[in-house]
Amino acid sequence: MSSSAGNQVRASHILIKHQGSRRKASWKDPEGQIIRNTTRDSAVSQLKALRDDILSGKAKFDDLAARYSDCSSAKRGGDLGPFGRNQMQKPFEEATFALKVGEMSDIVDTDSGVHIIKRTG
């Protein structure tokens, strides 16, 4: 392992944007029609249901990310690749670094929307 191993993580995520998101458009909703009509509570409920499906084994994280995430990383199953400190929004960074490899977060709020994060490296 390199000396910087503890300074970088790799993660995948599922992002659901909502009315309070700083950018109300995504690859699957370019005009933001759905996002503008999605409350934060609704986005959280959707993410919780997806998280439950993953935890119960009904679905795989990367499949759900590809289908439901508002992030362009959806085409990679939510994979964001490796990143270090100060490269992501603070709540996202803190949640990711707190996870062990293979663990999945609870709901994480950022300016982008609400996320569930899976640490993959």
Image (cartoon, helix red, strand yellow):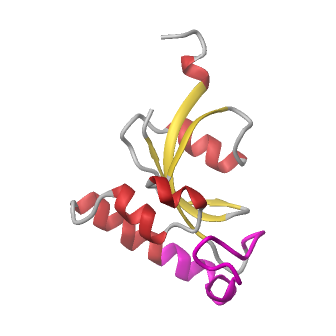
Judged by its main secondary structure, the magenta piece is loop
Q: In the picture provided, is 44 more to the left or to the right than 112?
A: left
Residue 86 vertical position relative to residue 117 in the rendered view, above or below = above
Residue in the foreground of this view, choosing between 107 and 29: 29
Give the magenta range: 21-45
Residue 32 is situated, as x and y percent measured from the top left of the image, at 69, 83
Nearer to the camera, 90 or 32: 32
Which residue sits at x=59%, y=62%? Answer: 71
Q: Position of residue 87 (x, y in %)?
A: 72, 39
Question: Vertical placement of 42 versus 8: above or below?
Answer: below
Task: Tell which residue pokes out farthest to the left in this image.
Answer: 57
Residue 43 located within the stretch drawn in magenta: yes
In magenta stretch: residue 77: no
Q: Residue at x 62, y 78 (%)?
A: 40
Residue at 69%, 63% (x, y): give it: 112
Percent coordinates x, y for residue 95 in the rendering: 56, 45
In the rendered view, does 15 fall on the left or right side of 101?
right
